[in-house]
Image: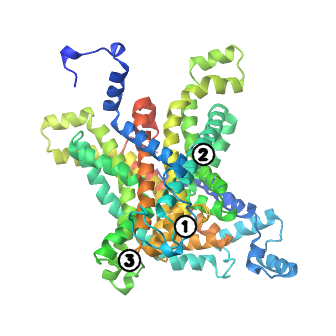
Amino acid sequence: MLSYVLKRILATLPVMGVVVVFVFLLVRIAPGDPAAIIAGDYATPENIQKIRVGLGLDKPIHVQFGIYVMNLIRGDLGRSLHSRLPVRQLIEQRLEPTVALALSTLTFAICLAIPLGILAAWKAGSLIDRAVMVFAVAGFSIPVFWLGFLLIYGFSVKLDLLPVQGYVSFREGFLPFIRHLILPTVTLGLVYTALLARITRASVHEVLQSDYIRTANAKGVRPIAVLFVHALKNAAVPVVTTIGVGFALLVGGVVITESVFALPGLGRLTVDAVLQRDYSIIQGVTLIFSFVYAVVNLVVDLSYTLFDPRIRY
Amino acid sequence: MQDKASFVPYDAMTWAQKVRRFIWRNPTMVAGSLVLAVMVVLATCAPYLRTVNPVELNPIERLRAPGAGHWFGTDMYGRDSYSRVIYGSRISLLVGLVVATLTSATGLMIGLVSGFVRRLDNLIMRVMDGIMALPDLLLAISFVALTKASVRNVIIALVIPQTPRVVRLVRAIVLVLREQPFVEAATAMGARLPRLLVRHLLPNTLAPLIVQGTYVMASAVLIEAGLSFLGAGTPPEVPSWGNIMAEARSYVRVGFWLLLFPGLFLATTVLSINMLGDGLRDLLDPRIARRMR
């Protein structure tokens, strides 16, 4: 088992390597010279060249890559091209709202989707099943930012129940923290829930057709026990996989949701960096997100053994 | 539905009866295709649908609520919202369709090669894994940020993250098929690699490819709108649903109709594409389709 964990971690490294190269190249291939952008419209060629040397952009590309990798290993993500602040510091400042939103969305989605999916599968073919499926397809098709504005209009403008935008750290008060987080969580969570509910329903439905479920029912096991003791574990693998895969969706959704609700998180940082062509920040954030995504998928893979003892590593 | 006395074998059915049977059996797919067809008609016939110039400013008429002269109201510059939404459908549908086609074509080519040529398989899959490790939206945003904001760049930015999924799908099918006797027979008869791939393997990938293509299209329409909303997509001069909503975001209190209608059209379009995809999937081959989930 331990050897499998190590093997999986080793397998992730080449993927991360490709990601690092990809991110590095993506940013360098672009037309448009960051030094010129920073220097402004009235700069002389000497100024631009000085800035370029200062940023280290004049060295040949493999040297730049080498420097970049050496810094990465030391944990140095470089400096923002515009503000000269360390990228790492910028990321650390913006981490909390994003993590809060991501965790609350995950919790909301899992707590809502899995029971809904199980219910729909158990009462397959009924009105509830149809309703859940319609909700799933609809929820997945709705653009996140539109849903956000609909909710803002309904709950903040018309009913005046919740704040329109902004973020309050939980250190400054638990209730304001929750109040500011509700709408963004529901917005992003509904889309994620739709996806999860659909997969849960399909997976549980398939498991419920199995012989051992029929045996359990024939034995007289209570329906709740049948569902939660026998069916759920067997149905878990595709569901957990989707939670992992949906994480990439979550990242994209977080970026948009933070923009709609003005949360000062990593998503906003990325969008601002993109609009300013700040390569270092773009590189740093993309790397962080990809790294977290790889870790999430690793955890998902390892969790399979919990659910299905037949999967032995 | 049909009682025993009126049972008609399929071959003896009239054309009308066959159509009714199809609709009865595949309601979601029919509904989805109808709505999508309506959207396509709206997009192509935009100039004939009582629209005015979507970029024409008319500050006297700014921020009017939906009413007789302006069905969807006017925006902060006095532009007619109805016209902008109708013209905006052109961009969204165009981007969706082109991205779906390009992704399918590229993914098909790479997948066929990767599945069949063992030596290249490992390398190609590592690269695909690397691309899939980057979240879609971030990759697209980065690409558009680094190039000029134009429809063409948005299309490229959307094709890159979606291609690995198609590659995986095609490759999975090819991996199964390449051990089949008919491949061996074809090779024995002298078929070389290109002919093998195109003539024998490709036709078997078409059904799941089309289904996946619809999902790619739905995804592309949504992400394009998201990109435009963030300011990293279609340039502001060209009305697209995401653009329109981006400009309208400060007017939630005074002009909510500016956000309501573009989003409604966007959600309906994506929903119809998804319904069409689901219907196609159930229709074409449930076995292969389940492997795609």
Q: Please check whether the numbered discs 1 and 3 fall on a single chain.
A: no
Q: Secondary structure at mark 1?
A: helix
Amino acid beneath label 1: Leu
Mark carried by residue A164:
3
Q: Is disc 3 surrounded by few (<14), some (14 to 19) or many (20+) residues within 10 Å?
A: many
Q: Please check whether the numbered discs 2 and 1 fall on a single chain.
A: yes
Q: Is disc 2 surrounded by few (<14), some (14 to 19) or many (20+) residues within 10 Å?
A: some
In space, the residues marked 2 and 1 are separated at their CA atoms by 21 Å
A22 displayed left or right of A39: left
Amino acid beneath label 3: Val
Amino acid beneath label 2: Val
Q: Nearer the viewer, residue A7 or B4?
A: B4
Q: Secondary structure at mark 2?
A: helix
The image quadrant that residue B103 belongs to is: top right
Residue at far right of view: A46
Mark carried by residue A79:
none
Could you tell me if the residues under marks 3 and 2 are in contact, i.e. CB atoms within 8 Å?
Answer: no
Residue where numbered disc 2 is placed: B98
